[in-house]
Image (cartoon, coloured by chain):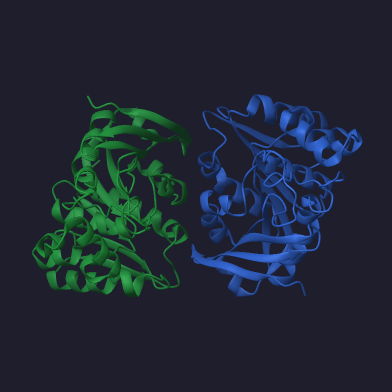
Chain colours: A blue, B green
């Protein structure tokens, strides 16, 4: 049994919003995650789980406080789990200049191979393996998992779902980084965490994974047209092209006038929760 | 024309979440307020406005980011305005020890008479007069105003509505400070801002105002039973008693297991927005 320690609990929409601390064996540090348990969690039947991956600079809290996902999760009986965006704590290295887009708060959901990052920065394994294992050990959940995220977390959700279709049954994203290989954020993070091995970079790039043969049965993406990062960093068009070439049924919606903020996410969050719920067996 | 300067704009539920800065003549400092303009604001017909008063330590942002009020406001065509909780900026005095419950972030919606507070700490006049004047000058809104708030802001909403029934047509509150005269927060704020004049204190105490003859046509209050401040600070029971004695039709709901957080507020926010919308002419 891997211990988890309750950090806080707030009743929310008839269920419970809780935060737990645990020792991560994969990341070699203490981690905190947020979990929303809908009222149905008390009724004994295992519930499906939506994993949410947040963007640069976020912790486990931003999404749970601002996205308004609990309302629909309570209605539909979905558990939602939100991990932190990087390893944390004493001994975990950070970018030398404290950059917002590398190091703490910017794990990019990869398994780092370079020093000094390789020991702690293994967010890919944490999200794919350790965290679901912990959730399934401690909470009344089924093996029906899906995944979503925003920006860097949208990139994480897409790449994790493309590489683990049996483990995550559905994936959606808000304003994902479509192709880290082809944008400044990725061109800093990929060599920084992974070194020069460009074949390895392709394992963490949604468009490259699709080109290399990975498939999804369906995909929902919302992207604001007024998002300041759209053109230089997110490049939604590359994802649309890759999906079209590969015959992936992707619903990529350009949302007129919306930006990169949680005001955008909260507007469409209920649709995403419903979309996931429909694709998970209950 | 009193100028307002746009600070930020985010599309939200088809409408716009905006923040503006302006020079307050009442508070003698620059102030920022948040306003949610639903999609109906573009259609020419003046819309009703719900004023939201936040609690201790908040700015104009907490409510707009965390309460999830925009969804229903967009559906029902309500404008929501959220002011800051105190005057701000250079030259505005703060509590000598930086206490969270007095000075900056803790204006208590009174007109201070004591030094050094009297020049700036006039949040009562700001919320009752200056801010609605500014909103009605710059936005497509009607004179249908209502008011709500949380904790210190619940106290503000109740006392302002009780003293200005013609100006605010409806009032609701989340976990309001029911009687500042009878709790530690109030026993610090009232003498601090108002001095020893206990008759003046009664003008800023919902229960005392009701005892002294003020009336409301209806009232909705939600209060969590697991709220750590309920027993010592909020004392909802005093408000229930005062309303009952006065024959005020108050729906004071004790919500089982909920605490003082925005997770509590967001759970019941949609009901409050609907409740206000029903009581305003459109």
Residue drawn at x 25%, y 54% as measured from the top left: B157
Residue drawn at x 14%, y 73% as measured from the top left: B245
Give whichever of A88, B119 is nearer the camera. Answer: B119
**Placement of B163 over or under A47, stated as above or below:** above
Give whichever of B203, A29 is nearer the camera. Answer: A29
Residue drawn at x 32%, y 44% as measured from the top left: B83
**Placement of A248 over or under B164, stated as above or below:** above
Give whichever of A133, B126 is nearer the camera. Answer: B126
Residue A8 figure quarter? bottom right
Residue A78 figure quarter? bottom right
Residue B109 is situated, as x and y percent measured from the top left of the image, at 24, 52
Left or right for B49, reference A244:
left
Left or right for A56, reference A191:
left
**Residue sticking out furthest to the front:** B96
Q: Is residue A205 visible?
A: no
Residue B98 is situated, as x and y percent measured from the top left of the image, at 38, 55
Question: Which quadrant, please, contains the N terminus of chain A?
Answer: bottom right
Q: Is residue A245 visible?
A: yes
Question: Which quadrant, please, contains the C terminus of chain A?
Answer: bottom right
Residue B186 is situated, as x and y percent measured from the top left of the image, at 25, 64
Instruction: Count the numbered circles shown.
Output: 0
Left or right for B192, reference B77:
left
Residue drawn at x 37%, y 70% as measured from the top left: B229
Give whichever of A44, A30 is nearer the camera. Answer: A30
Residue A229 figure quarter? top right
**Placement of B266 over or under B84, stated as above or below:** below
């Amino acid at each position: 049994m891997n211990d988890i320690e309750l950090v806080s609990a707030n009743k929310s929409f008839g269920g419970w919003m809780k935060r737990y601390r645990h020792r991560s064996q994969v990341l070699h540090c203490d981690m905190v995650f947020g979990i929303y348990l809908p009222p149905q969690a008390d009724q004994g039947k295992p519930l499906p789980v939506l994993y949410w991956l947040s963007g640069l600079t976020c912790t486990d809290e931003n999404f749970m406080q601002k996205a308004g996902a609990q309302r629909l999760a309570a209605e539909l009986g979905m558990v939602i789990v939100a991990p932190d965006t990087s390893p944390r704590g004493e001994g975990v290295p950070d970018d030398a200049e404290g950059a917002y887009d590398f190091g703490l708060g910017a794990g990019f959901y990869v398994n780092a191979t370079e020093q000094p990052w390789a020991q702690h920065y293994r967010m890919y394994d944490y999200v794919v393996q350790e965290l679901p294992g912990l959730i399934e050990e401690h909470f009344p959940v089924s093996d029906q998992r899906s995944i979503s995220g925003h920006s860097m977390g949208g990139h994480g959700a897409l790449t994790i779902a493309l590489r683990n279709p049996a483990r995550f049954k559905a994936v959606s994203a808000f304003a994902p980084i479509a192709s880290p290989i082809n944008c400044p954020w990725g061109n800093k993070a990929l060599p920084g965490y992974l070194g020069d091995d460009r074949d390895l970079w392709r394992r963490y790039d949604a468009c490259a994974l699709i080109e290399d043969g990975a498939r999804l049965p369906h995909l929902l993406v919302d992207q604001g047209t007024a998002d300041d990062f759209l053109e230089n960093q997110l490049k939604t068009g590359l994802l649309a092209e890759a999906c079209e070439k590969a015959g992936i049924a992707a619903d990529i919606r350009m949302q007129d006038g919306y930006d990169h903020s949680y005001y955008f996410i909260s507007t469409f969050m209920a649709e995403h929760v419903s979309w996931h719920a429909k694709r998970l067996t209950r």
